[in-house]
């Protein structure tokens, strides 16, 4: 599960106090960071954030689009993730040996693919002979088209010029493309990525669709953890699109049409829906001019209105049980607010108290002392643009059961509600969070990631400036108040993975008053 909070981005290894004092979190340093970060919005709406750092002759770049699975509609789930894959296939000038020869083949492939999908959608009533003919013809044309395709073109360009960390990721909230390069290769990035934004070609569409289906089988259908998490999230959210898995439902992926994907592309992948953060050995003004030169002429698009759907208040505990040939697990999720709500900071601290490192409460109580679990932790899921879940996750230690792990979680929750966290424990947790926070900002890529992320999700990268100060304001009374408000039975969803023919089952009602 991905977490949006700063304190969760890296492991809990502490760094020297001198480094903490030097880098963060004094108000003077916050002001210094604000002065060092430069930003500009192009006329077409593209937001560019630049931070000068001359520690090495490199630059890290994160281009982030505010679009993820939360923006999809029923029948077209998985489309954002699919597009992430397709946008590696090149443009009219990249990824092709001869685009003029390629164009008619692309048109034929789309026509055949659509016809085949329409026939397959008939199910048992489909014309078997027609289906076989369409499939054979599609395979034949795809094979011919393959001779005109240059694969992995972006990877080869970047690797040949010293690029590292070239990758992309789709979440519920956004889609990001990242790379670190020698700073004198910045124009190469601008050339390639502006072309990818303006002139993408969704080649190898049907072949890649099959790749996505195979990825889903590997990550979800054949993964006990993936199956449990998918069912857990789908149960926790009744109305909100967070219930949709990032990779999409299998039947939707199977019949995603190229026209639908192209429409989604044109709706969201435009400069006025993009944030670019660059951190490294660069000159801000020269960088802004370079970006303007390559991206400034790309027209903006009318963005779809944001979703108005909000998850209704949960009125009672929900449960889902998944039976598989796998080791038992339990997930317990509580609906909670997201940033910039003040209680979001309190949940950051609660996470630190419960599961930040081997001295945390859950590790000590469930893993070391009671020995009922091999792992026990907390996280946020599934996104951060909208209200989400605070999730407890645990795996029983044989011969203990998921019921025992679940009860142990509830015991720790009751302590949060009724016993104030000591000043010493709270200070230790805040110190850990500050150290991890600093680690995340220490590298160019870590800083670029956070600048682009909070500009996209929180609406302003300056969320970074106030985070540590807000964390320090959290009191033991705040923790008790938030635990009592949100960590209650009527607000929780319980997901249990049990072995087939096992008697572990779902929790019994002895917890009804928790």
Image (cartoon, helix red, strand yellow):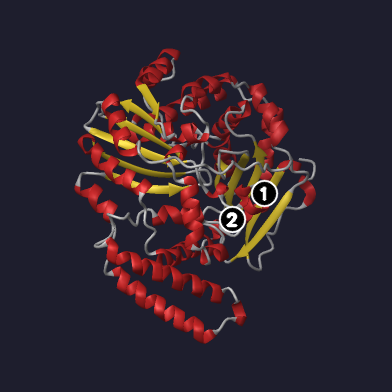
Q: Where residue 113 sits: x, y (%)?
A: 46, 71
Q: Quadrant of residue 101?
A: bottom left
Whether tag 1 and tag 2 are in contact, CB under 8 A, the answer is: no
Residue 487 seen anywhere in this rendered image of the structure: yes
Residue 32 is tagged as none
Quadrant holding the C terminus: top right
Q: Where residue 262 sits: x, y (%)?
A: 46, 56
Name the residue nearer the viewer: 56 or 310: 310
- Circle 2 packing at 10 Å, graded few (<14), some (14-19), many (20+), is some
Q: Residue at x 24, y 53 (%)?
A: 156
* Label 1: which secondary element: helix
**Would residue 469 be found to the left or right of residue 415 on screen?**
left
Name the residue nearer the viewer: 353 or 2: 2
* Label 2: which secondary element: helix
**Would residue 241 be found to the left or right of residue 90 on screen?**
right
Q: Residue at x 49, y 60 (%)?
A: 259
In three-dimensional space, the C-alpha distance between marks 1 and 2, rounded to whole angstroms, equals 10 Å
Q: Where residue 346 sits: x, y (%)?
A: 60, 28
Q: Residue at x 50, y 87 (%)?
A: 129
**Would residue 436 be found to the left or right of residue 296 on screen?**
right
Name the residue nearer the viewer: 31 or 233: 31
According to the image, label 2 marks what residue? 230
Residue located farthest toward the bottom when viewing the structure as drawn: 129
Nearest to N terminus: mark 1 or mark 2: 2
Q: Where residue 210 sits: x, y (%)?
A: 44, 67
Residue located farthest toward the top when viewing the structure as drawn: 28
Q: Quadrant of residue 283?
A: top left
According to the image, label 1 marks what residue? 236
Name the residue nearer the viewer: 242 or 429: 242
């Amino acid at each position: 599960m991905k977490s949006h909070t700063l304190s969760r981005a890296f492991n809990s290894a502490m760094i020297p106090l001198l480094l903490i004092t030097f880098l963060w979190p004094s108000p003077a340093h916050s002001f210094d960071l604000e002065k060092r970060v430069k930003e500009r919005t192009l006329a077409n709406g593209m937001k560019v954030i630049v931070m000068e750092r001359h520690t090495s002759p490199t630059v890290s770049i994160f281009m982030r689009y505010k679009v993820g699975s939360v923006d999809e509609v029923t029948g077209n789930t998985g489309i954002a993730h699919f597009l992430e894959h397709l946008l590696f296939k090149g443009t009219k000038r990249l990824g092709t040996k001869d685009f003029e020869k390629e164009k008619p083949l692309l048109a034929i492939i789309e026509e055949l693919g659509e016809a085949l999908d329409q026939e397959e959608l008939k199910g048992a009533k489909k014309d078997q002979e027609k289906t076989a003919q369409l499939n054979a013809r599609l395979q034949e044309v795809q094979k011919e088209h393959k001779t005109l395709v240059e694969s992995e073109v972006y990877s080869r360009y970047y690797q040949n010029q010293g690029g590292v960390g070239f990758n992309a990721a789709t979440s519920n909230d956004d889609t990001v493309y990242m790379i670190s390069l020698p700073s004198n290769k910045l124009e190469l990035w601008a050339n390639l990525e502006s072309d990818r934004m303006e002139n993408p070609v969704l080649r190898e569409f049907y072949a890649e669709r099959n790749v996505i289906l195979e990825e889903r089988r590997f990550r979800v259908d054949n993964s006990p953890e993936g199956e449990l998490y998918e069912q857990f999230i789908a149960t926790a959210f009744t109305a909100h699109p967070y219930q949709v898995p990032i990779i999409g439902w299998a039947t939707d992926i199977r019949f995603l049409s190229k026209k639908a994907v192209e429409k989604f592309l044109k709706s969201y992948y435009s400069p006025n829906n993009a944030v670019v953060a660059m951190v490294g050995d660069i000159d801000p003004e020269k960088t802004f001019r370079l970006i303007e030169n390559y991206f400034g002429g790309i027209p903006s698009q009318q963005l779809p209105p944001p979703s108005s759907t909000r998850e209704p208040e949960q009125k009672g505990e929900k449960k889902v049980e998944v039976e598989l040939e796998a080791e038992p697990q339990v997930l317990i999720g509580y609906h909670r607010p997201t940033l910039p709500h003040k209680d979001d900071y309190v949940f950051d601290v609660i996470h630190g108290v419960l599961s930040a490192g081997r001295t945390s409460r859950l590790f000590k109580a469930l893993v070391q002392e009671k020995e009922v679990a091999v792992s026990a932790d907390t996280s946020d899921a599934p996104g951060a643009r909208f209200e989400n879940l605070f999730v407890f996750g645990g795996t029983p230690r044989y011969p203990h059961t998921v019921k025992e792990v679940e009860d142990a979680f509830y015991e720790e929750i009751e302590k949060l509600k009724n016993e104030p966290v000591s000043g010493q424990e709270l200070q230790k947790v805040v110190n850990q969070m500050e150290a991890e926070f600093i680690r995340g900002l220490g590298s160019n890529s870590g800083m670029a990631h956070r600048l682009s992320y909070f500009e996209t999700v929180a609406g302003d990268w300056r969320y970074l400036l106030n985070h540590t100060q807000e964390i320090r304001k959290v009191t033991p009374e705040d923790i008790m108040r938030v635990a009592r408000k949100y960590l209650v039975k009527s607000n929780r969803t319980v997901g249990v993975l049990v072995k087939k023919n096992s008697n572990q089952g779902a929790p019994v009602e002895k917890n009804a008053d928790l």
